[in-house]
Image: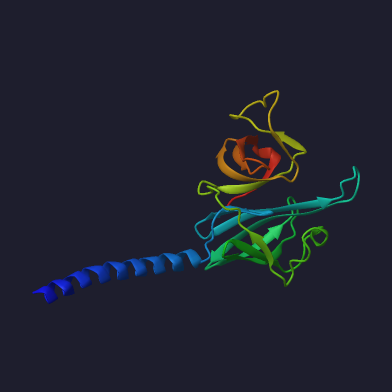
């Protein structure tokens, strides 16, 4: 009788442990898979919806001296997802020329490769032709509600709490600042700017931005 009780006790101990091991292995495998998701990937702001992806790449460099040389790598992006990557087309705001490329999602980030470089990019990021440009995803961002991305094209645009006239004193963005679009309403965009210390959320006139929707 004692042997039977021992055998039952062993069975009850082994099976839960085995089930836990399988569950942990499954979770680890899922966590190890690259996932296409909205977010800030260093200089690249991405919005992902279903099988579509939209993005803004904005990186600027220059000297600390006023009036010194400034270089920028600026372009918009749109593409279709397939597996852990997307075939994309990229363009400078307001220009018809399109440059093809591919966006691959990696563990903790993404990598972008283009068929040719955009103007200014060699002086900022270096080449993206034939060499994937690696980008790390900013951790801890709640990006599920992003419906698109935008790039400020106005010289300056101020945040509003609601659509309407700008307050006398308000945070503002300048040309080529990238944002995530949270909502669209009759010529207005509710956006999120990641900021240096904390995100800033508010309404901007849609005419002040170039917007790309997935």
Front one among 180 and 206: 180
Front one among 212 and 201: 201
| Residue 162 at x, y percent in the picture | 58, 29
Q: Which of the 4 quarters of the picture holds residue 137?
A: bottom right
Question: Total number of numbered labels?
Answer: 0
Residue at screen point 76% across, 42% down:
175
Residue farthest to the left, as pictured: 1
Going by the image, does 181 lie left or right of 113?
left
| Residue 61 at x, y percent in the picture | 81, 52
Going by the image, does 16 lie left or right of 31?
left
The C terminus is located in which quarter? Answer: bottom right
| Residue 126 at x, y percent in the picture | 78, 64
The N terminus is located in which quarter? Answer: bottom left
User: Looking at the image, is 113 positioned above or below residue 195?
Assistant: below
Residue at screen point 91% across, 44% down:
67
User: Looking at the image, is 154 positioned above or below residue 30?
Assistant: above
User: Looking at the image, is 92 positioned above or below residue 209?
Assistant: below
User: Looking at the image, is 124 positioned above or below residue 68?
Assistant: below
Front one among 192 and 142: 142
Front one among 57 and 25: 25
Going by the image, does 155 lie left or right of 187?
right
Residue at screen point 90% across, 45% down:
65
Residue at screen point 64% across, 44% down:
194
| Residue 151 at x, y percent in the picture | 69, 46
Residue farthest to the front, as pictured: 2
Residue farthest to the bottom, as pictured: 3
């Amino acid at each position: 009788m004692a042997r039977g009780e021992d055998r039952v006790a062993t069975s009850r101990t082994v099976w839960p442990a085995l089930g836990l091991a399988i569950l942990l292995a499954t979770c680890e495998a899922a966590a190890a898979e690259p996932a296409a998701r909205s977010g800030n990937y260093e200089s690249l702001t991405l919005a992902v919806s279903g099988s579509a992806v939209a993005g803004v790449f904005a990186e600027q460099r220059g000297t600390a001296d006023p009036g010194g040389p400034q270089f920028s790598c600026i372009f918009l992006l749109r593409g279709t997802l397939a597996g852990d990557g997307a075939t994309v087309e990229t363009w400078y705001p307001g220009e018809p020329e399109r440059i093809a490329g591919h966006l691959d999602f990696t563990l903790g980030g993404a990598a972008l490769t283009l068929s040719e470089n955009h103007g200014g990019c060699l002086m900022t990021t270096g080449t993206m032709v034939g060499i994937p440009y690696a980008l790390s995803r900013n951790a801890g961002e709640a990006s599920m509600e992003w419906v698109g991305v935008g790039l400020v094209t106005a010289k300056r645009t101020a945040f509003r709490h609601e659509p309407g006239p700008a307050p006398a004193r308000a945070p503002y963005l300048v040309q080529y600042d990238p944002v995530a679009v949270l909502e669209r309403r009759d010529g207005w965009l509710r956006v999120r700017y990641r900021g240096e210390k904390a995100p800033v959320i508010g309404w901007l006139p849609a005419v002040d931005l170039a917007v790309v929707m997935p």
